[in-house]
Image (cartoon, rainbow, N blue to C red):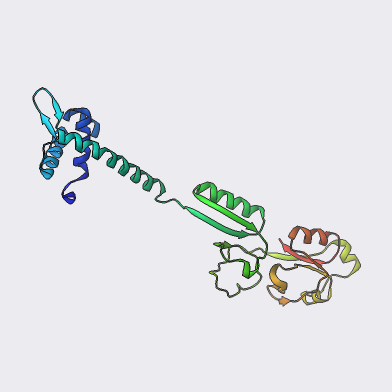
Amino acid sequence: MLENIELQWLLSFQKVYEQLSFKRAAESLQLPKSNVSRHVALLEQALNVRLLERTTRKMIATEAGERFYHNLSPLLIAMGDMLHEAHQNGDAIVGHLKVITPDLPFLAEAMAEFCHQHPNIQLSCDTQLDPEEGLLEGFDIVIRFGRGAIEDSGWVARELVRWPSCVVASPCLLERCSKPSSVSELSRRACITSLSVLQGMPWQFKTAGAVNVASCYKVNSGHMAKAAALKGLGFAILPV
């Protein structure tokens, strides 16, 4: 029986019952009065029961109409709530997002803006420069530094951004030792490198390729590497 009954018939009956008038119900539904009257008639025909008693002077609900209305109203309210929720969340991003990312200002701003635009996201974020492979289980997104080609792993990896870098040195360091004549000389000079980030990967140059450098000053911080370079502790490779 249900497949033979249209939603608009039910809405028309609900309004007529509440307004006790086809005219006022039609105005509320923004439909022609004839359509509302036909909807109620079709509903009564499909149910094979009289829901409303009509006279020239007034309209009243029958006993069956009373029961039908009181059973129908909660269903229509629930359906309206369901459709509203589906509409509100249809394009929404919802869920618990677990992220590992370096503690960098522009990444912090991007993360905050993302959660501002998608308020149904619950964020759990750990800040690490170079997380160990065995500690990545359970995280959805891992942002990490790399050097050279992306290493093969079980993760779906994509390059997000590439920073042009250059080798820097302080004037006081260059006063103590001459400027290298080639990048290969850096392998014999004091250099500032990372401790665990990039896992000791060689410095990569566009034309000279990879150069392995030695260091007695190893830090996992660009700020600390810059400070050490300014003090003349060694050559450092830093973003431009």
Any part of residue 147 in sight: yes
Q: Position of residue 157 (x, y in %)?
A: 55, 68
Of 225 and 43, nearer the camera is: 43
| Figure quadrant of residue 135 | bottom right
Q: Is residue 219 left or right of residue 143?
A: right
Q: Position of residue 219 (x, y in %)?
A: 77, 64
| Figure quadrant of residue 149 | bottom right
Q: Is residue 222 left or right of residue 99?
A: right
Q: Is residue 3 above or below residue 160?
A: above
As drawn, which residue projects farthest toward the right?
A: 176
Query: Residue at the spot x=57%, y=74% of the render?
Result: 153
Q: Position of residue 103 (x, y in %)?
A: 67, 56
Query: Residue at the spot x=89%, y=62% of the render?
Result: 172
Of 81 and 141, nearer the camera is: 81
Of 82 and 117, nearer the camera is: 82
Of 194 and 205, nearer the camera is: 194
Q: Position of residue 6 (x, y in %)?
A: 19, 45
Query: Residue at the spot x=49%, y=49% of the render?
Result: 120
Q: Is residue 205 left or right of residue 170?
A: left
As drawn, which residue projects farthest toward the top?
A: 57
As drawn, which residue projects farthest toward the left?
A: 56
Query: Residue at the spot x=41%, y=48% of the render?
Result: 89
